[in-house]
Image (cartoon, rainbow, N blue to C red):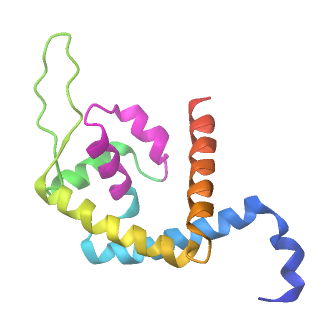
Amino acid sequence: MDESLRGYWDYCGLNLLFVSRLLEERLESRLATYGVTLRELMVLRLIADDAFIKQKELDLYVGHFHEPIRKTLDSLESKLLINREHKRRCGKRVSLADVTESGIALLNKADTILRRQEEIFLGHLPRATRVGVNSTLENVLKKTLTH
């Protein structure tokens, strides 16, 4: 690393931003092998965790980016990773989508990729520190997203 940049890197927020951008680029390139984007994977994971999640909530958690969530859902459905067959019931909440067997298999493969990339970026930290960093980031995200 260039020593003249040393002071610039003293800001934790900037370091997190740079690391997250590097991680995002690496994940995108790894996921391309499976024909899925990071955004699609994030949406797929959220639906797998909560089939009754609302489209508004997906927008909040995943972000707006350059395309609406509906387009991402269409893409996941065309790749047969989710099924959006809706059955409206009077007064009952219906699921946004159901994850297919192909979607579940992809999530399992992606978990392996995510763990491997986490090791590359955070492997030099002791496990307890990694768990602490993750908990802190989750708390910050929770507070930021819910307020």
| Vertical position of residue 29 compared to residue 56: above or below | below
Q: Position of residue 96 (x, y in %)?
A: 24, 34
Q: Quadrant of residue 107?
A: bottom left
Q: Position of residue 68 (x, y in %)?
A: 39, 45
**Quarter the C terminus occupies:** top right
Would residue 10 appear left or right of 136 to someone viewing this image? right
- Over which residues does the magenta segment extend? 40-65
**Quarter the N terminus occupies:** bottom right
The number of discs equals 0
Residue at (34% x, 45% y) in the render: 46
Q: Nearer the viewer, residue 120 or 81?
A: 120
Q: Position of residue 103 (x, y in %)?
A: 19, 56
Please, what is the dominant secondary structure of the magenta stretch?
A: helix
Would residue 47 appear left or right of 63 to someone viewing this image? left
Q: In this orientation, does residue 8 appear?
A: yes
| Vertical position of residue 12 compared to residue 1: above or below | above
Residue at (87% x, 87% y) in the render: 3
Q: In this orientation, does residue 79 appear?
A: no
